[in-house]
Image (spheres, rainbow, N blue to C red):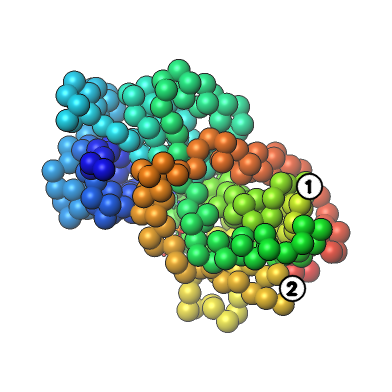
Amino acid sequence: SHPKRFALIGAAGYIAPRHMRAIQDLGHQLAVAYDVNDSVGIIDSLHPQAEFFTDFERFYDFCWRLKRDPATALDYVIVASPNHLHHAHTTAGLRLGCDVICEKPLVPTLDLLDDLALVERETGRRVYNILQLRHHEAIRALQAKVAATPAGQKFDVELTYITSRGKWYHQSWKGDPRQSYGVATNIGVHFFDMLHVVFGQLQASEVYLSADDKAIGYLEYERARVRWFLSIDAADLPAEVQGKKTTFRNIRIGNEMLEFSEGFTDLHTVSLREIVAGHGYGLADARHCIATVSAIRTARPVAAATERAHPTLA
Ligand code: NAD
Ligand code: HP7
């Protein structure tokens, strides 16, 4: 198959180099990059021929001009901008006649997801969401293990997801709920998606604590009861990893601990390879985690029954 041509929105950000590397590793081309910020020198080490714009208008006009010649036309637009811009940047890419690969959380609500489905029909193009935990080896193994156990059995699961962040986080768009939708949506969306893939449909959800830097709750799925704890506060790291690691992602099922902090670096490349091969995760796949985070955002925190409380609450 011939190399695909990409545009990247949000090219100066933290996650952008992982997309640029994925494009390069798979032998494709970054034709054009766009960001309102011009700290994009990383482009030279990966895609030195790429065009770059800091104005949306000039970027969009350039993309339209590329369409005149099938040899230069774009195949995909990647959206790696702040969360509140995903919908607008995704529809812009679709209306250019491109398939769009958008970072998580795809959109904050089911209404906006339905609108993307409408624009997919209007344009005949597709939207793919980056849900890279679905490609993680440890998660795939867990999925296979659960699938191999009798359907009647419900697992008791304790999920601890700590990715510590400094003070900058709260000063940036990530700390602003109007732009990021808060930690449970911005970071929790990964494990809510993963829990659904492993344990099936969601049956109940309760929220016990919802703060700027942490959230605690309970989720019941067809195959599991999950006590979850999410934090970006380094003080919440377990004593044994304090000062050694900044992240701790762990699923405990019974006495078994499944640490899945490692193994993330190449998952954007795996995601891109699967999308280009026609096996990407589309709107229907993203639906469940979007429904989950939007319910959690609007839930009123309640007091936890003892058996539903993550140990952190005790
Ligand atoms: P970031 O703040 O580092 O980067 C965002 C970039 O978007 C910045 O360079 C900013 O200048 C740019 N931007 C802001 N407004 C813009 C506009 N109107 N037009 C074009 N560019 C604009 O954030 P990040 O960590 O790179 O996050 C980007 C996206 O990727 C977010 O949706 C985030 O949720 C997601 N993300 C996903 C993962 C993952 O594990 N899959 C990891 C990190 C971030
Ligand atoms: N880091 C930065 O330097 N800048 C950043 O913007 C973010 C991190 P991990 P990822 O914080 O917004 C996770 O905790 O897995 C540093 C979420 N993804 O492994 O890359 C950080 O301080 C993602 O959805 O972070 O990203 C560490 O030193 C969310 O948008 C290092 O990078 C993102 O945090 C690695 O940090 C965020 C998952 O949890 C899978």
Kind of residue indicated by mark 2 = Gly
Instruction: Indicate the position of residue 116 as horizontal and vertical percent values.
Output: 50, 27
User: Which residue is the site of mark 2?
Assistant: 254
Quarter placement of the N terminus = top left
* Residue depicted at 29% across the width and 33% down the height: 75
In this picture, is 111 found above or below 49?
Answer: above
Q: Position of residue 97 (x, y in %)?
A: 34, 24
Residue 103: x and y, percent? 44, 43
Residue at image coords 28%, 37% = 7
Pointer 1 local density, CA inside 10 Å: few below 14, some 14–19, many at least 20? few
Question: Relative to 236, is 227 on the left or the right?
Answer: right
Q: State if disc 2 and disc 1 touch (CB < 8 Å).
A: no
For mark 1, what is the residue?
Answer: 204
Q: Position of residue 151 (x, y in %)?
A: 77, 57
Q: Residues within 10 Å of mark 2 (few under 14, many from 20)?
A: few
Q: Quadrant of residue 82?
A: top left
Residue 240 is at least partly visible in this image: yes
- 1 or 2: tag closer to the N-terminus: 1
**Vertical placement of residue 301 versus 311, above or below:** above
SS label for mark 1? strand
Residue at 41% over, 57% down: 267
Label 1 to label 2: alpha-carbon separation: 21 Å
The local secondary structure at tag 2 comes to loop
In the rendered view, tell whether residue 314 sits above or below residue 18.
below
Name the amino acid, label 1.
Answer: Ala
Left or right placement of residue 241 versus residue 127 in this view:
right
Residue at point 48% right, 57% down?
135
Residue that sits furthest to the bottom in the current view? 240
Quadrant in which ligand 2 is drawn: bottom left
Q: In terms of image quadrants, where is residue 114?
A: top right
